Image: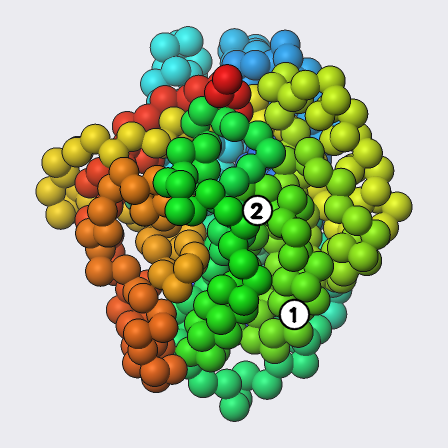
Amino acid sequence: MNIAQWCGKYADLDFNNETALTCVEEFKDIVDGKSLILYGAKIIGESMCNLLHEMGLSVCSFVDKNYDKIRELCGVIVNKPEWLKTIDTEKSCIFAMVDPYNLSEVISYIDSLKINYSELSDGHSAHSVLQTAWCTIKNKQNIPIDPRMCMNCSVMKLTCKALKLYLMRIMDFDVETATGTDTQKSIGYSLAGICTLKCKDCHEMTPYAKPSRREYTPKDVYFSDMKKVLESCKFVTTLEFVGGEPFAHPELEDILRETIKYPNLGLIHIFSNGTVIPNNDVCRLLSNPRIAVTLTNFAEQLSLKQREIFERVKKKMKESNVQYIVRFLTTWTESNSFEFVDDNVEKLKKRFSECRFSSCRRLAYGIMYACQHDYAGELTGLFPLIDNQVKVHDFSAEELAEALEEFNNREYFNICNYCQLPDKTKAIPAAIQLQ
Ligand code: SF4
Ligand code: SF4
């Protein structure tokens, strides 16, 4: 069996402890005696490397076009792609640690370098399978799952079952008596239509919010929306606070205090640009084991003052025992165009299934949106609602469960035809500031 066959065997499997153990053993057999090489030294590559290390497997090298800027990741050297010419590829397993829709680009690039390799594996799929199996085993052994690891995990997009089971276990959640839909795996709640930064290419398009939405979402609006949706759901694995800048929200303390009491909500994940220092009361709440923070460092785009604040936010997170990670982002994927694509249904389904935002539902002011692009259209007033989005307060709890189920089971959304993601976009510098 090779890695592709192994992935095919396990990709759609609902793991239990036994199948997870077999899956991990088979992976180890396949790579036994081979040098493990990870092509792509970004977030997915880093996650895979950490996982392999945790499993007791060593990684021989990363390979990346930006090798001279990165040099080393997780203690492993980063070589240039041409380095692959110098190794015995028959005795190596090379994993392309890129989003699936970038795989063909990597293959063409390696081919253009005239590198002979016996197999280049889809590392994204391999990581998803292996990490889920590994976390299933850890969960069975009552080993805690660190949410910081989940924040970089390729499985997270699908809001992983291992994470859900772990959260249910630590929350003593009674799955037998729970009612409502099981399809609402995550919610991204937009807490603000204003931000401390003005990023030209913001995925949420916050700097372009229409005047009526340039505000922090009042806490009562948030409470009423969340109460309504959670009443219709069995268990929501993750809630993400997106923005604008959540730490700038004047009612964040009250919002967090109530949110951690919701009995059928697991992980609360806050995205911050690290330019606002949360007060002591907020930090105390943030130290809850079910809360995790991603601080995105846009270093080059920040003023000296903002960089200094970023360091102070980091220090405060550490001193307050908050579970946080720092993410350096130098590039983004351009995503703000509403230009018509004119794909047929089959193409739309394919694009949707490959889009990493396809499960990123957004909730704001009583409306559940398909994704951040859908939400951005409404926030800015640039694009009308065309997907029969779920107006959550129009339904009873039972009706809403059905409406959400129908919404979450769609194979694509009409808005995808007014979006260039995932494959018709290009990389752009992250967080360029508007004047
Ligand atoms: S999302 Fe978390 S629990 Fe799930 S596989 Fe990834 S790291 Fe493990
Ligand atoms: S509109 Fe469709 S393709 Fe675009 S980000 Fe949303 S789910 Fe992805």
Task: Tell me if mark 2 has few (under 14), some (14-19) or many (20+) residues whose alpha carbon lies within 10 angstroms of its own.
Answer: many
Q: Position of residue 80 (x, y in %)?
A: 57, 12
Outermost residue on the bottom side: it is 177
SS for tag 1? helix
Residue 270 shows in this picture: yes
Q: Residue at x 50, y 27 (%)?
A: 199
Foreground pick, 334 / 217: 217
Foreground pick, 418 / 200: 200
Amino acid at dot 1:
Glu
Establish if 313 lies above or below 242.
above
Q: Residue at x 63, y 49 (%)?
A: 249
Classify mark 2 as within 8 Å of ligand 1 or not, answering yes or no. Answer: yes
Give the residue pinned by disc 1: 258
Q: Position of residue 391 (x, y in %)?
A: 31, 66
Outermost residue on the right side: it is 319
Mark number, residue 153: 2
Q: Residue at x 46, y 43 (%)?
A: 214
Amino acid at dot 2:
Cys
